[in-house]
Amino acid sequence: MEFKRNVYLQHLISGKGNGLVKIVTGIRRCGKSYLLFNLFRNHLLQSGVDEEHIFMMALDDWKNRKFRDPDVLMNEIERRLVRDGNRYYILLDEVQLLEHFVEVLLSLMHDEQCDVYVTGSNSRFLSSDVVTEFRGRGDEIRVFPLSFSEFYEGVQGDLRQAWLNYSTWGGLPQVALLEDEAKKRRYLSNLYASTYLHDIIERNGVKNDDGLRDVVRVLASSIGASANPKRIANTFASVEGKHITNKTIDSYIGYLEDAFLVSEALRYDVKGRKYIGTETKYFFTDIGLRNSILGFRQQEPTHIMENIIYNELLMRGYQVDVGLVELWNTDNQGKRSRVRLEIDFVLNCDTERIYVQSAYRLPSEEKWGQEQRSLLGISDNFRKVIIVGDDVKGWTNDQGIRIIGLWDFLLGVEGIE
C-alpha cells in the first residue's frame, strides 16, 4: 500500500528550479521524508535526472551525525557535485539538526547549479528563519498527516469502516499501514512519549515533565471547547491541587505548536470584525495522537469530527478562525437579552469569507434550528455551510445555507466554495 501525497508532490515539482529553498515542514512521522526521498526522488529519476545529480542526506540518522557539522556537510556536497552544467538536487532531511543551517542553505542558494529541498519538524526554527533570514527566498510546504481522502484512497473498502478507523487511529502513514489494533495503540503511545514529548522536553529544556504532560492532556480533553492558559491553570489549582503558572502553561502550549502537535484557532468577532485574544481553541494535528494521549477513553464523535474538519480546512489552505456573533434573545416574558453564539469556523481567503458549522447529527427540527441560528444572525452575504456527519447529499435550504455530507466534503465530492 502506498499513499501518493499528490498535492505535496505537485508543489515540489512546480517549485523545481525556482531559485527558492523548498522547505517541507510538519509534525514528525507525517511522511515528509518519504515524500522527499521516495516520491520526489522517483519523480526526478523518471523525468530523466541522473542519480548522480541527486544528493540525499537524512540528518536524523545516527550514521550521518558527523554531517550535522556544516563544514563536513558542505565538503561532502562539493565532493559529490558534478560540475557539468546540469542542475543538482540537494535533499536534506530534518535540517534543523544541522548547525548554522540557515547559513548553509543561503550558501547553497548562491550556487546556480544547486536546487535545494529540506524537511524540518520545528516551526520556530524554520518558519521564523524563513521570514527573517531568507527574505522571500524560502518556499514553505506544510505537510499534514494523511487526509481522509488520502487515507481512503490507500485503504479502500467500506467507507463507514474507513471513517471509524481514521477517526480512531488518525492519519500518520505508519499507523495506517498497521493492521493490528494493539500495534496501532502501542505505536502511537510510544511515538508520543519517546519522540514528540522527548523532543519538546530536550529542545526547550523543560524541567517539569509532568506539568507538560498535564497540559497536553487538558488540551486533548478540550478539543472543540475554549481554552486559555489562565483557565487551564485554574483547573489544575481547583481540581487537582497543582500549581502551574499561566506563563509556564503559555510556554508549554507554544512548544507544542512549534512541534506541530497542536494548532491554535483564534476567536473572531464577526460583527465587530476583530479578534478576541482571551478566547481560543486548540486542535490536534493528528486525531490518533490525541486519542492515544487520553488512552482512547474520551471518544466524543462530535468533537473528533470538528477536529478533523479543522485539519482538512488547513490542508486546503484556508486561514481558519472560530467565529462569534452576538444576537438579541427574547424569552417567554418578552424580556430581551444579548446572547453570544459560536460559529465553528470562519474561513478568510483574500476578499472572500465562508462560515462553516460542524454538526455530527441533525435528528430534529430543534437541532436544525440550533445549528442554523448563529449563521442566520450574520448580516453579510458570504457563503454559509453546515457539514453534517450523516451520509446526506448536498442541498441548499430556504435560508440559503448549503448542507453538505461529511464524507462528500472530505473526499472532495462537494466543496464549500
Image (tube, rainbow, N blue to C red):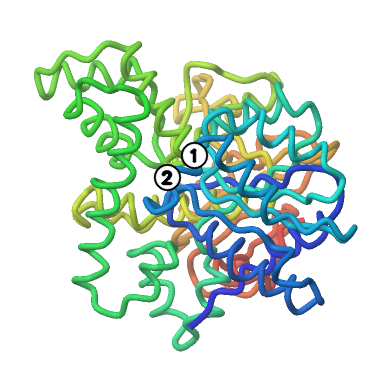
Q: Position of residue 178 (x, y in %)?
A: 32, 75
Q: Residues within 10 Å of mark 1 (few under 14, many from 20)?
A: some
Q: Is residue 222 left or right of residue 309?
A: left
Near-viewer residue (107 or 150)? 107
Q: Amino acid at mark 2?
A: Arg
Name the residue beneath numbered marker 2.
65
Number of numbered markers: 2
Residue farthest right in this picture: 85
When asked about the image quadrant of residue 217, the answer is top left
When asked about the image quadrant of residue 301, the answer is bottom left
Near-viewer residue (304 or 48)? 48
| Spatial separation of the CA atoms under disc 2 and disc 1 | 6 Å
Q: Amino acid at mark 1?
A: Arg
Name the residue beneath numbered marker 1.
68
Residue 125 numbered tag: none
Q: Position of residue 249 (x, y in %)?
A: 32, 19
**Tag 2 near tag 1, CB within 8 Å:** yes
Residue beneath the point at 63% across and 70% down:
39
Secondary structure of the residue carrying tag 1 is helix
- Compared to residue 261, the image places residue 188 above or below, namely below
